[in-house]
Image (tube, helix red, strand yellow):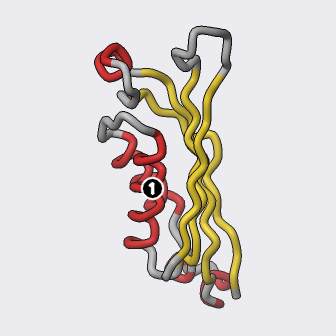
Amino acid sequence: MTGRISLEGLEFHAYHGVYPQERSSGNKFEVDVVVDTAIDASAFADDLGGTINYEGLYEVVKEEMAKPSKLLERVGHAIAAQVLRRFPQALSVTVTIAKFNPPIGGVCKKAAVTIREERG
């Protein structure tokens, strides 16, 4: 059986950006991660081993968000690749990362990048 597991609205203070001030002072980011996954029948009998643990999924996102990068595309790819590595039952991963108040010279609540990766 397949299903979808998601964590939405994860918030981090991180140091991603092209400009030096973004990498020194940081910014607020929001991350959504959606995993299409095989779900073992044991999950329906309350066995956590039959599904992806939310806490483990959060740890992957947290670890990758802690690594400064110039581009959100790189961070999204790293999160998706780690999810596929750590969770063999994951079939595909979609990661959306939004940066609040990006330095674009105008008013913008947030800028976002979405990356989707599939197993195989």
Residue 45 vertical placement versus 11 (above, below): below
Residue 5: image quadrant is bottom right
The residue located at (38%, 26%) in the rendering is: 18
Residue at 54% in and 66% down: 117
The residue at which mark 1 appears reads as 77
Out of 104 and 53, give the one closest to the viewer: 104
Q: Residue 94 versus residue 86: which sits nearer the camera?
A: 94
Give the image location of residue 77, x and y in percent.
45, 55
Front residue of 47/93: it is: 93
- Relative to 7, does residue 51 appear above or below in the rendering? below
From the viewer's perspective, tell me whether residue 101 is left or right of residue 120.
right
* Quarter where residue 43 is shown: bottom right
**Secondary structure category for the residue under label 1:** helix
Q: Quadrant of the N terminus?
A: bottom right
Give the quarter of the image for residue 9. Answer: top right
What is the three-letter code of the residue carrying label 1? His
Q: Residue at x 62, y 78 (%)?
A: 46
Is residue 5 toward the left or the right of residue 85 in the image? right
| Residue 28 in picture, x, y percent from top left | 50, 24
Q: Residues within 10 Å of mark 1 (few under 14, many from 20)?
A: some
Q: Position of residue 29 (x, y in %)?
A: 52, 31
Q: Position of residue 37 (x, y in %)?
A: 61, 76
Q: Is residue 12 above or below residue 74?
A: above
- Identified at 63% across, 25% down, the residue is 110
Number of numbered discs on residues: 1
Q: Is residue 20 left or right of residue 94?
A: left
State whether residue 87 is above or below residue 28. below
